[in-house]
Image (spheres, grey):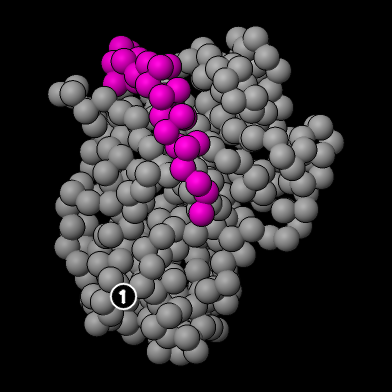
Amino acid sequence: MKKILIINPFGIGDVIFSTPLIWALRKNYPNSSICYICNKRAYDIIKSNPCLNKLFIYEKDDYRALWAKSRIKCIKKVLDFLKMVKTEKFDIVIDLSLAYQYSFLLKLIGVKKRLGFNYRNRGKFLTDKLTINGFDDKHVIEYYLDLLKLLGIDSSEYSNIPRVYLAEKDTVWAGAFLKDNSVNQTDLLIGIIPGCGASWGKDAVCRRWSKNNFARVADDVIDKYGAKVLLFGDSKEVEICADVQKSMRHKAIMCCGKTSLGGFLGLLNKCELVITNDGGPLHMAIGVGARTISIFGPVDERIYGPYPQSDKHVVISRNDISCRPCYKKFKYNLCEDRVCLNNISVDEVLSAVGDVLAINRK
């Protein structure tokens, strides 16, 4: 195959989950051109991947907004995008979308081999497909790698570790930022992420451990290990990080809202440990090589957690609660009690900090 296209319209975590698939394709087809379609949020995560030749941005929200204003302009924009993709003359597309629209459009523009998942009978425009009921019995990375079977590729021969590659300018920026904040190369840096990224929107609070608990953990790692704490979050999580800082006895380095996505990756790479809720930021930290402690509430860590399992990545969750995990088939229950999160103690997290910091970073 001369030209391969991968489509993943989902969020940052899902795009990172696809990096072992990208790696296996590159190793199996070293001379092929491999391209990728993603949304705007995920672009900065995948753009430095050396296994990819070209990226396309397809932002559904932009098209929906344009449709509301002018259907004619929206249709024209879609056709222009398809025309651009058609000029690449792809031999095969691997569609991770779980929908039918992408494979239908690629059929229209002449891509003859279309691989993907037949989820809820949405795979009718795929030429080769695996029927699934959702992501419910193994990690998403394993589902993605299963698609290689349709190409006769044994994924066990290739690395299944998710990777995020840093741009040199982001590494340089992170070093300058830390220097400006009086961080020395010998300082122990621990990142704290009390938000959880953009997924779930207004319902993201259902995935967040207590801000006061994060503040207590931050103070304790400063007291016990002499660490310098970096508070992370995007521009919409500034208030969350500010509340954590107000509850702390010590002063943290406020990074929230002050970095680009690339700069965030550069700082994560400098951290010896990142303590976070589940979500895209967790997988960014794993992807750049940081050790992690992640707190999982309604989401199943066996499907969306760190992968593969490692003593460098500790998950803390309540598996003795019958209603957990409640995020299934891409739906979740809104729960006021949030027992699965509120029953996780600060002492549990601090115990995990000691265990993870005792492991030499590889």
**Which quadrant of the view contains residue 155?**
bottom left
Query: Measuring 36% from the left and 72% from the top, which residue is drawn there?
Result: 158
In this view of the protein, can residue 272 be seen by the observer?
yes
Q: Is residue 130 above or below residue 69?
A: below
Query: Measuring 78% from the left and 53% from the top, which residue is drawn there?
Result: 172
| Residue 317: x %, y % from top left | 30, 28
Classify mark 1: residues with Cα within 10 Å, few (<14), some (14-19) or many (20+). few
Q: Find numbered disc 1 in the image and state the secondary structure of the residue it sits on.
A: helix
Residue extent of the magenta highlight: 336-362
Query: Measuring 64% from the left and 35% from the top, which residue is drawn there?
Result: 189
Of residues 233 and 245, the one drawn nearer to the viewer in this rendering: 245
Identify the residue position indicated by label 1 in the image: 157
251 left or right of 13? right
Q: Is residue 341 above or below residue 36?
A: above
Query: Measuring 28% from the left and 59% from the top, which residue is drawn there?
Result: 142
**Which quadrant of the view contains residue 356?**
top left
Tell me the kind of residue under disc 1. Glu
| Residue 296: x %, y % from top left | 35, 31
| Residue 72: x %, y % from top left | 55, 59
Q: Is 338 inside the magenta-drawn segment?
A: yes
In this view of the protein, can residue 63 be seen by the observer?
no
| Residue 269: x %, y % from top left | 61, 48
254 left or right of 312? right
- Specify the quadrant that holds the N terminus: bottom left
The furthest residue to the right: 180
How many numbered discs?
Answer: 1
**Which quadrant of the view contains residue 98?**
bottom left
Q: Is residue 74 above or below residue 212?
A: below
Q: Is 38 inside the magenta-drawn segment?
A: no
